[in-house]
Amino acid sequence: MTKEEVKGANEAEQQAQSKKALKKQQKEAEKAAKKAEKQAKLAAEQQSTEEDDFAKDRYGVSPMVQSQQKLDRVLVRIQELTPKKADQLIWVRARIHTSRAKGKQCFLVLRQQQFNVQALVAVGDCASKQMVKFAANITKESIVDVEAMVRTVDQKIESCSQQDVELHVERIFVISQAEPRLPLQLEDAVRPEGEGDEQDGRATVNQDTKLDNRVIDLRTTTSQAIFRLQSGVCQLFRDTLTNKGFVEIQTPKIISAASEGGANVFTVSYFKTSAYLAQSPQLYKQMCICADFDKVFCVGPVFRAEDSNTHRHLTEFVGLDIEMAFNYHYHEVIDSITDTMVQIFKGLRDRFQTEIQTVNKQFPSEPFKFLEPTLRLEYKEGVAMLRAAGVEMGDEDDLSTPNEKLLGRLVKEKYDTDFYVLDKYPLSVRPFYTMPDPNNPKYSNSYDMFMRGEEILSGAQRIHDAQLLTERAQHHNIDLEKIKSYIDSFRYGAPPHAGGGIGLERVTMLYLGLHNVRQTSMFPRDPKRLTP
Amino acid sequence: MPMYQVKPTSGSDIKIDLPTCMYKLPNIHAQGGSYNEHALQNGEVDPALQALEARQDEILRRLYELKAAVDGLAKTVTTPDADLDATTLSQGSTASVFTGTTDLDSLLGKDLGALRDIVINANPTRPPLSLLVLHGLLCQKYRVLSSVHVHSSVSSVPPQLLSCLGPRHADSYARHHFQLGFTLIWKDVPHVQMKFSTQKMCPIEGEASVARFLFRLLAAEPRDAAAATQVDGWIDTAVFQMAEGSAKERAAVLRALNSALGRGSWLVGQELSLADIVCASSVLQTGSASSAPPNVQRWLKCCENLGYFSCISPLLP
């Protein structure tokens, strides 16, 4: 094809096109005109309505709070909204939990932590049509300030924690707006397992999504309750031990040598050399005992480089550790620890009943049962019970996880307790620093404590004699050079002592009967998760 | 002769045709005197003497019975009221009361290395007093590891209920030193419940049934079926009509006890039995001891004097 030919063809095409284009343009112009007309109409309407909007000072988006002014306005907590406050005009700051517009009215559910209340914006004396529309369009999870009249209701509002009152909104201002698209819906995140089947189309949120968006997940009533209860565990642990005359100590987390043998430690670079993250504060607790602190405890992070992706392992968790010098028998220490646990359980039972109920709604479980004083069985008896149930195991075999669970069930069946101590473990399954039993060299003065059939504490009377410690370490083929500082700390006189440590997350999980320790760790760390 | 005479109804000279198929015997009436002499000659005892001997035996037997009854009474009568320590004496008398030998292996099955632990769940509002009495008896017979626990379903328990099994055993740190475990758990249960082997045995419900189980461990069950039935009858009366019954039923039980105790010093047989333990416990528990009829009062006194009931006195209303 020559150039001209091409040109001619193009022209012809262009002509044809221009005809089409003309038509198109015409149409578009018509469309635009219509649109403009519409818009003008709308604008006019809006103008007219805006002029009509008598309530425009009663709603809006507040300027960002930069501490411009210090108002004396009293904000009422949602949990305090009871029929006692009926017919009072109050201010509330809360999140929009849900909103539902229905003609001339809009129902909002306002939430504050685990409490929520129904609020109603209805066209009337103080609310205009525009105000209702504004309220309906506020995105979920936004924080609002609301002035409202408290009214009692005839029929209980089943979906809210404040069932006897509702708020009739007179003013509403947005303090902080949430993005319209939430990564997960709160209602989905608290839906009980199994209820959100694919058949009924209701969604549940899987664990990873929850953990990726922890900040929203933590707003759910379940999470709120879990972490309030966890704080209670810590508080009760501290209070009980302080009352018993224990001293709280802080131990270093960056250490030069692995405290328990050497496996499962994280290595970190430490200037020109390397260091380890503490696996347990054991050495330091024992050093405090040797330094005459008599009874010590500490609450702090513990690191385990175990590459196990189970429901109960974390690489970083909060350890509640106890170490105590005793007079004659290490059972004095068991009694102290078990009594502390019982006080924690009693405190939780008596002071955190609402939280327990809240968690139970999403994750139903039997209430935690325990005995006071705590049941103590001996390892031999445990083995005998397992054998009677048909398990084949040797006298000195360690308990496997399924056997632990089975033993927990057997003990529960007979004694109806979810918490017990198993005493006198075989020496061969315990670490080298465990004191051997005085009467039978095959056994040791060591104990484990179990909650709902899962081990939560492992402890023992420690060898406080450098000579015996050296022998035991050699028996276990441990390099004496590596544990020299540990052995040396017993050379200058050490009182007999025993202790143990529990994991806060595990205790919370097992007390509530949850199935994953990640639910009770605020920002869990496991082999696959380092964020958030 | 003060008696009237009757004419013979037939003449003595009647001839009877005797059949020939039968053998003949000499007329014993006609030759009475000679027959006796003949027997004596053969070295046999005169029946009169025999009768005399039988009467003597009977008297001796009744004397022995009386002696046994007096011995039984003496046990209670000679127990001091105030001066002597009742517990030391009771140990002496227990030895004589519950002498049956027992082998726990045969009663409870073979020992697998675990402590044979009897777990009893009881409601602190109604402490099972009879079981506490039986616990005391078990302790005298075996090395028993006793422990009291409070279950989380109960918020608080009065201190006397925590110490109702006596002070902690000095060796309680070594569980394998004991033959038997007695674990009392105060728990929110409608009825007393006992668990022993969760695999081989279903839980035993009710104070009466548990009491029977524990009493069997003492091997003091009456051998005789009639007595055993009587004991069972009294136990059920005590549990269903005394402890759980109305005021009317209680009064009836007290009357029945009173009349039974009028016939002997104990409810069944000549010695303290499970019937006495359970009945006395329920009378004491219902607080009807002070208003009880005289025989019941006397019997309660005897029970207390034996010392078995001292462990429950701090728990009485």
Image (cartoon, rainbow, N blue to C red):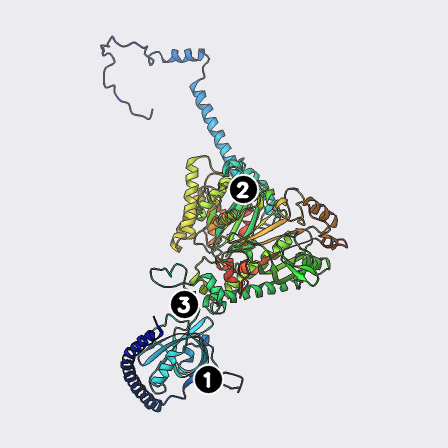
Q: Kindly report the distance in space between the C-alpha atoms of the residues bearing marks 3 and 2.
A: 48 Å
Q: Using the image as rendered, state which of residue A118 and residue A369 is in the foreground.
A: A118
Q: Find residue A516 and name its label.
A: none
Q: Secondary structure at mark 2?
A: helix
Q: Quarter holding the N terminus of chain A?
A: bottom left
Between residues A38 and A408, which one lies in front from this camera angle? A38
Q: Residue at x 53, y 86 (%)?
A: A70
- Would you say the residues marked 3 and 2 are in contact, meaning their CB atoms lie under 8 Å apart? no
Residue at horizontal 28 percent and vertical 82 percent from the top: A22
Q: Earlier in the sequence, mark 1 or mark 2?
A: 1
Q: Which residue is mark 2?
A: A384
Same chain for mark 3 and mark 2? The answer is yes
The three-letter code of the residue at mark 3 reads Glu
Spot occupied by residue B33 in the image (x, y as percentages of width and height):
38, 13
The residue carrying mark 1 is A62
The secondary element bearing badge 1 is classed as loop
Real-space Cα separation, disc 1 to disc 3, in angstroms: 28 Å
Earlier along the polypeptide chain: callout 3 or callout 2? 3
Q: Nearer the viewer, mark 1 or mark 3?
A: 1
Res. A506 image quadrant: bottom right
Q: Which mark is residue A187?
A: 3
The chain carrying label 1 is A
